[in-house]
Image: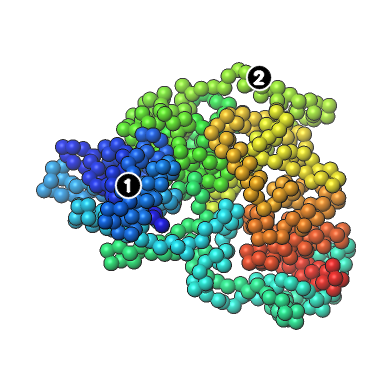
């Protein structure tokens, strides 16, 4: 399989300007001068090195038009690359381009320096893997500026072996990306990369039939309390005792037990190498990346660049789609709203490197897409690095996101809707931005009037209706700020914004359903009734829903007419035919177990009964685990069923945990249960076997 479609080489000529010297394996058909200018950013002469990122095939002006000759004495790798490049031409598949430019001082030439750049056009969004080889290749190109040097790089990249690289499903990627475990999905890797190691006694969990004799006698579940569970009459169980009893039980019943093994490498990556210039360069392929998630960006850097602590975090008039918290709207929320509602966005770094600007654009796209897992369409309108040469191209792209270093963009407020200044940390709203028509405002008022009527008959303090109290946007940023102060990692921040967008889509589905009577964005919304589980996003009460509706309605109304919304509809309808868990809304059921107030005994029983009957296959288990990430307590909501006063609920909970634990990934989630939960699970499972149920 070919990984790279083209390798480009450019240099700055004092007479000709930015010039594209080589295009391998053939010309792209894109404007050569435009490509050269994108590879050689403005102000590069003030630096010794810089990186730029841009895309091809996202816009007619930046499309690959020339078919690659597939047979002309090429090597096998080059012929394969030509064939796949032709496929990209036919399908308009986006090509991700990363370019390295260097300036070397040389007093023997005019202007006292030589500027050259090499770019790789790849089909993979994880463009960061090519940085080490680009560093070596550009050094070679300074020594030998012929096409032979560029061809050597092209062939080396396409000979990279990814034949054994695991291809994870979207659900598997969602599970992997929010876990710190380095051994998830290890069974998807070649067996020779595994290193068997003894399991820690306190992390070992056996599955299968259980004997009550393996465990000390315990109080019944009806009168189980922390006091009698850990009373002096109860023998003390150490982790070693627990593991020994589990091992003894498993041996007597001849049930295969899951033994934790450790990979010699982190399973978040597939490790391979590229042979170039007699060097074997190690390459780590990230396995949890989505197509809309490009490069090695940092959402933490984006948040710190536009802090809420700025004296005047935003400039310009308030806009209903952007300032959902009024004048106190945090800058990151303004940016997030602009991304969701497809406003024209420019991220400006007048004295910054092109790489810094590009990385912030990539982080902004990940912010608006939920790490590429919730919303789509950002790659088609993102320009990580742009210059004046493609300003006319930007005008043809609705809701573009562009990173620039030229201060001319700041002057032309008609080119953008919001301007994010990296150096000041401020966000400016253009005076030329469009506002929603009066008809839309009237419709919005009408949509909230019915909710007002529902609570009008109740004795409610008017202050409770103030949406600024417990405002979702402000609560989100408070949680993010607390995570940053607690030195939480990048993945924790990404996960929090993804959860916010996931709920936003479900809220939009409910608002659409209330307005038109149906929705194709997500599951329909209705409460639980006997023998019918609830579905969709449901508020705790009418007052809470009214406050959420007031806050989200403006951006929901704007988002419903965007291209990204159409992609969500298509994705939901497609998943309705392919998802493993059908006939229920699993997110609703887990939310009821995790956050529900005054959940009836019958609803709890029906939830556990349905889940235990529906979750059997591997794909069904993985789809359920997506909703049970470790940072939200893992299997905690399910494990609470082990302590329910109804015996049937406890049995359903054990059956569900058994179904989860029969697969390697599920067994590792079971290891995450605390000792209190695991003891209850083992004891109830033993009782279940003894009773023959």
Q: Secondary structure at mark 2?
A: helix
| Residue underneath mark 1 | 68
Task: Place residue 232 in its image quadrant.
Answer: bottom right
In this picture, is 559 found above or below 490?
Answer: above
Q: Secondary structure at mark 1?
A: loop
Disc with the residue nearer the chain's start (1 vs 2):
1
* Residue 361 visible within the image: no
Camera-side residue: 515 or 639?
515
In this picture, is 500 found above or below 243?
Answer: above
Q: How many marks?
A: 2
Give the x, y percent position of residue 519: 68, 34
Q: Residue furthest left?
A: 108
How crowded is the residue under tag 1: few (<14 C-alpha within 10 Å), some, or many (20+)? many
| Residue underneath mark 2 | 442
Which residue is pictured at 36% across the width and 53% down the height? 81
Camera-side residue: 341 or 397?
397
Separation of residues labelled 1 and 2 (CA atoms): 55 Å
């Amino acid at each position: 399989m070919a990984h790279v479609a083209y390798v480009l080489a450019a240099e700055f000529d004092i007479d000709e300007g930015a010039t594209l010297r080589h295009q391998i394996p053939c010309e792209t058909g894109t404007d050569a001068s435009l490509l050269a200018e994108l590879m050689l950013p403005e102000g590069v002469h003030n630096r010794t090195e810089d990186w730029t990122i841009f895309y091809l095939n996202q816009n007619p002006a930046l499309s690959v038009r020339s078919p690659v000759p597939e047979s002309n004495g090429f090597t096998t790798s080059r012929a394969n690359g030509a064939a796949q490049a032709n496929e990209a031409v036919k399908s308009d598949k986006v090509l991700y381009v990363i370019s390295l430019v260097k300036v070397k001082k040389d007093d023997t030439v005019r202007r006292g320096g030589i500027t050259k750049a090499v770019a790789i056009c790849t089909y993979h969004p994880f463009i960061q893997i090519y940085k080490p080889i680009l560093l070596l290749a550009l050094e070679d190109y300074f020594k030998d500026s012929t096409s032979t040097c560029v061809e050597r790089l092209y062939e080396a990249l396409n000979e990279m072996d990814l034949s054994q690289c695991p291809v994870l499903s979207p659900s598997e990627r969602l599970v992997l990306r929010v876990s710190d475990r380095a051994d998830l999905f290890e069974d998807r890797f070649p067996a020779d990369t595994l290193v068997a190691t003894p399991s820690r006694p306190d992390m070992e969990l056996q599955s299968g039939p259980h004997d009550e004799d393996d465990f000390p006698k315990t109080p019944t579940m009806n009168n189980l309390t922390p006091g009698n569970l850990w009373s002096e009459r109860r023998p003390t169980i150490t982790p070693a005792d627990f593991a020994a009893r589990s091992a003894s039980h498993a041996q007597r019943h001849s049930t295969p037990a899951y033994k934790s093994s450790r990979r010699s490498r982190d399973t978040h990556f597939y490790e391979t190498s590229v042979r170039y210039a007699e060097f074997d360069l190690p390459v780590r392929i990230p396995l949890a990346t989505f197509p809309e998630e490009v490069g090695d960006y940092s959402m933490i850097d984006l948040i710190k660049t536009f802090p809420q602590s700025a004296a005047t975090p935003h400039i310009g008039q308030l806009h209903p789609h952007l300032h959902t918290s009024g004048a106190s709207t945090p800058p990151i929320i303004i940016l997030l709203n602009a991304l969701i509602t497809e406003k024209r966005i420019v991220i400006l770094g007048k004295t910054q490197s092109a790489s810094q600007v590009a990385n912030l654009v990539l982080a902004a796209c990940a912010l608006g897409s939920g790490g590429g897992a919730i919303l789509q369409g950002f790659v088609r309108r993102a320009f990580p690095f742009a210059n004046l040469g493609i300003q006319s191209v930007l005008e043809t792209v609705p809701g573009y996101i562009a990173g620039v270093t030229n201060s001319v963009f700041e002057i032309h407020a008609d080119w953008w809707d919001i301007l994010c200044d990296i150096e000041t940390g401020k966000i400016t709203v253009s005076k030329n931005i469009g506002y929603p028509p009066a008809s839309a405002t009237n419709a919005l008022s009408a949509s909230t009037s019915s909710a007002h009527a529902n609570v009008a008959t109740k004795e409610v303090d008017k202050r409770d209706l103030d949406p600024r109290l417990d405002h979702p946007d402000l609560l989100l940023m408070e949680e993010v700020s607390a995570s940053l102060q607690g030195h939480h990692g990048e993945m924790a921040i990404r996960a929090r914004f993804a959860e916010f967008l996931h709920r936003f889509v479900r809220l939009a589905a409910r608002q659409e359903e209330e307005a038109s009577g149906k929705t194709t964005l997500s599951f329909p919304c209705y409460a639980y009734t006997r023998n019918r589980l609830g579905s969709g996003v449901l508020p705790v009460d009418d007052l809470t829903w009214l406050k959420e509706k007031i806050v989200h309605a403006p951006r929901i109304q704007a988002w419903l007419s965007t291209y990204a919304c159409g992609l969500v509809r298509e994705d939901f309808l497609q998943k309705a035919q392919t998802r493993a868990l059908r006939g229920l809304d699993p997110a609703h059921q887990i939310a009821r177990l995790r956050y529900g107030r005054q959940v009836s005994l019958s609803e709890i029983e029906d939830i556990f009964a349905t889940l235990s009957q529906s979750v059997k296959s591997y794909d069904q288990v993985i789809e359920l685990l997506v909703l049970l990430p470790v940072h939200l307590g893992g299997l905690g909501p399910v494990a609470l069923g082990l302590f329910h006063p109804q015996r049937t609920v406890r049995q359903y909970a054990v059956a569900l945990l058994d179904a989860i634990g029969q697969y390697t990934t599920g067994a590792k989630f079971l290891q995450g249960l605390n000792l209190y939960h695991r003891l209850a699970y083992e004891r109830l499972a033993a009782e279940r076997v003894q009773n023959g149920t």
